[in-house]
Amino acid sequence: MKDFLQKICLVLAGLVVAVLLVEGFAWLAPRSMLPGRFRDLRDQLDRNRNAESFMSPDPELLFKIKPNMNFVVRHPDYSMRIVTHLNLPDIGFRGGSIGGPAWAVAVGDSFTFSHGVEHEDIWTSLLAKSLGKDVINFGVPAQGPAQYTRILKRYALPIRPRVAFYGFYFNDLDSAVRFRRTKRQLIPVSRYLREYSYVYNLFQGRKRLKDQSPVFFKAEGIEFSLEPEGLRRNLRRQAEKFDERWAVVSREIDDAIKASEEAGVKFVLLYFPSRWEVYWEKINNQLNFPSTLDIDRLRRKVVEYCGAKKVFCLDLTPALKREASQNKQLYFRTDGHWNKEGNRVVAEAIRDYLTEKHIAR
């Protein structure tokens, strides 16, 4: 038994030394000496760290945007300048656009933030211009409902808006689980490895290549990247413990509604659909997903929740589908967020809803 344990320890020690040698070579060798895959990984790690460079840790939110940011993000789909127009001592937000009192605030993830689009073309800015009333953007990429509610209470409601928009996206059940898991971790290990480890990213890349075959989905007037197996897995994962995870998410929304009502602010829940939901008919016609995959389950649950709570709720899926039926490209090809046209459609749909419900007064 002792000899067996010694052999195991030797094997493990050898693996550790091998990993350290690979990491050391990848980090220290001149770029010209690196194999092609390692050069690509060095670029990927640089992008990962740059994406995190405008964030700082926060004990309650996990992470937040640093104040006084002004820099350019370059992506194959776009080039955008990120400016935090609203800067507080410890945090920054994209903020408002036309000035004056804050008529509305918007909390949410990168779809509220409007990643990939210049500030004057994001849906909150377009909505503010059409109403003549400023809408303050409090969106933070990669956050979820637990953080939306905390930002609403901690930063947005104190500026005394009349309306609070709460953006809810297709992957927010996963975001809620990730928030709880990360809160329990003293050190965000996966994020550290994603930003600094060549071996980790090599392994993850091989796993993705094995599990997923990325394709460019094309139809008349539109195209975007799609990983069919990844989408199947996302929908299956969403269905796992759906009711349990929805209970966690709905408690966060309940808290946001309660805080808004106590502040005398009208609460409006906005459902932001993914490109998969908007173009589902076209996608399914080509890829023939099994009928057991329910792309609309979460959307139906959100609408049902709003009806039960008697709160204002706008599902943006129909508006985006109407435009998509005219073969319009509403999402970036590889990034997956709304492009400039998508933001325009969203802003107009929200404006029409506010008018219909007599909120825009």
Image (tube, rainbow, N blue to C red):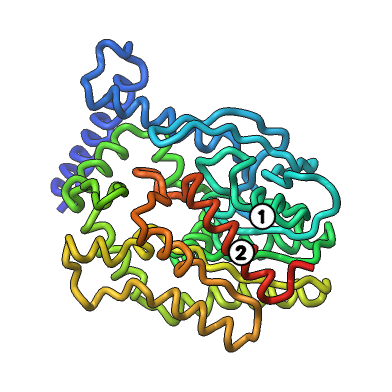
- Residue 168: x, y in percent? 54, 65
Name the residue that disc number 1 marks. Answer: 127
- Residue 200: x, y in percent? 31, 39
- Residues at badges 2 and 1 in contact (C-beta under 8 Å)? yes
Q: Within 10 angstroms of label 1, few (less than 14), some, or many (20 or more) residues?
A: many
- Residue 257: x, y in percent? 69, 75
Q: Residue at x 83, y 60 (%)?
A: 158
Query: Is residue 263 depicted above or below 110 in this figure?
Result: below
Any part of residue 171 in sight: no
The one nearer the camera, 30 or 43, is 43
In the rendered image, the quadrant that contains the C terminus is bottom right
Residue 141: give its label.
none
Q: Residue at x 25, y 17 (%)?
A: 34
Quadrant hosting residue 60: bottom right
Q: Amino acid at mark 2?
A: Ile
Q: Within 10 angstroms of label 2, few (less than 14), some, or many (20 or more) residues?
A: some
Any part of residue 17 in sight: yes
Quadrant hosting residue 38: top left
Q: Amino acid at mark 1?
A: Leu
- Residue 299: x, y in percent? 45, 74
Name the residue that disc number 2 marks. Answer: 350
Left or right of 194 in this view: 347: right
Query: Is residue 271 depicted above or below 343 in this figure?
Result: below
Element under disc 1: helix
